[in-house]
Image (cartoon, helix red, strand yellow):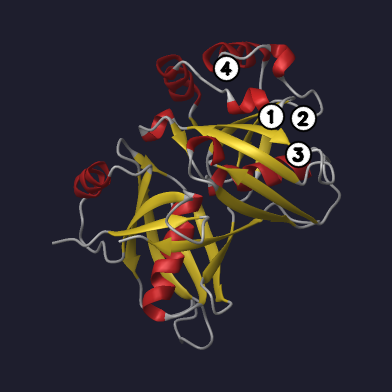
């Protein structure tokens, strides 16, 4: 029997965060079996680890990170990269083997993760796949606003509407008012069809907190029809994509630390921290995780 562990990521307890299933040994599991397990678990993603030999790429095992293959399945399909399931898996491995450096080989590329402890719990920091972003065309924006039941006047013009990527595509829209974000109520079938047409993993709808330096603190909501759920309470991949978007468009002073609060409007508060270096095309995403059962 395959054992599935249950972790909440981007939270320090089970009351918040985003749930992920974790299978620490998926050796020999067919794709159909992994998809079936993900559907049975019912979380937005379940991660499947293909154990490696624990050695670095030099094969010598000297002070190198532990290497594992990692695949992600939503209840409906395989996903190239998932941030919260990566954080959950890294912490699950650290619970078993202790903190340290890990490298996951994913469909989106190599993802290094650093797991540390401060005595009260484990925290994982992943280095994202390369980030890039492109402007959303007028027709795409019109269709997205209609599906989200938003008006152009709801948008914060300081943040251009883009499709940002850090392993997966995410449409990024910023709203002017926090109350409008809280009231988000979208047309699920229409948005699901639009996202399938364009290959978006989530739509990231954000509000910039004016009490923090510009572009460094956001409230976020992430509709996630491709995962078979209405909304994602914590989305590490979209947080990474947002960090890359802010850097590419010159919207933050670099290096930058960005705090994203997500899930509060659905009763599962989460905290994601994104560190954006001044150079390169990757970012770091940090969060805690806790086993629930």
* Element class at badge 3: loop
Determine crowd level at label 2: few under 14, some 14-19, many 20+ residues with C-alpha closer than 10 A.
Answer: some
At 46% across and 33% down in the image, what residue appears? 231
Reply above or below: 123 against 178: below
**Percent x, y for residue 69?**
38, 62
**Percent x, y for residue 266?**
49, 36
For the question of whether residue 16 can be seen, the reply is yes
The alpha-carbon separation of the residues under discs 1 and 4 comes to 19 Å
Q: Which residue is mark 2?
A: 159
The alpha-carbon separation of the residues under discs 2 and 4 comes to 16 Å
Determine crowd level at label 4: few under 14, some 14-19, many 20+ residues with C-alpha closer than 10 A.
Answer: many
The alpha-carbon separation of the residues under discs 3 and 1 comes to 8 Å
Q: Which residue is mark 4?
A: 144
**Tag shown at residue 209:** 3
* Element class at badge 4: helix
Q: Which residue is mark 1?
A: 178
Q: Are marks 2 and 1 in contact (CB under 8 Å)?
A: no
* Element class at badge 2: loop
Residue 280 figure quarter? bottom right
**Tag shown at residue 1:** none
The alpha-carbon separation of the residues under discs 2 and 3 comes to 13 Å
Instruction: Give whichever of discs 2 and 3 has the lower sequence position.
Output: 2
At 70% across and 33% down in the image, what residue appears? 207
Determine crowd level at label 3: few under 14, some 14-19, many 20+ residues with C-alpha closer than 10 A.
Answer: some
193 lies left or right of 279 = left
């Amino acid at each position: 029997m395959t054992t599935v562990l249950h972790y909440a990521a981007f939270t320090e307890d089970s009351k918040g965060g985003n749930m992920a299933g974790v299978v620490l040994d998926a050796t020999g599991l067919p794709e159909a079996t992994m998809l079936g397990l993900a559907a049975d678990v019912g979380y937005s993603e379940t991660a499947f680890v293909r154990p490696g030999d624990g050695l670095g790429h030099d094969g010598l095992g000297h002070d190198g990170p532990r290497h594992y293959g990692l695949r992600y399945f939503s209840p409906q399909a395989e996903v190239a990269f998932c941030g919260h399931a990566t954080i959950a898996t890294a912490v699950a491995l650290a619970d078993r083997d202790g903190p340290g450096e890990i490298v996951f080989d994913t469909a989106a590329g190599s993802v290094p993760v650093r797991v540390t402890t401060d005595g009260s719990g484990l925290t994982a920091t992943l280095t994202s796949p390369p980030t890039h972003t492109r402007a959303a065309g007028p027709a795409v924006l019109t269709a997205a606003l209609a599906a989200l039941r938003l008006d152009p006047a709801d948008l914060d013009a300081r943040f251009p509407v883009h499709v940002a990527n850090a392993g997966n595509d995410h449409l990024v829209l910023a709203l002017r008012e926090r109350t409008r974000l809280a009231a988000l109520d979208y047309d699920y079938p229409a948005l699901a069809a639009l996202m399938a047409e364009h290959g978006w993993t989530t739509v990231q709808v954000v509000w910039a907190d004016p009490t923090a330096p510009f572009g460094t603190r956001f409230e976020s909501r992430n509709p996630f029809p491709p995962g078979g759920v209405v909304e994602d309470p914590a989305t590490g991949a979209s947080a990474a994509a947002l960090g890359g978007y802010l850097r590419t468009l010159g919207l933050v002073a670099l290096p930058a630390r960005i705090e994203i609060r997500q899930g509060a409007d659905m009763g599962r508060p989460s905290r994601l921290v994104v560190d954006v270096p001044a150079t390169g095309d990757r970012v770091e995403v940090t969060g805690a995780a806790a086993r629930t059962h």
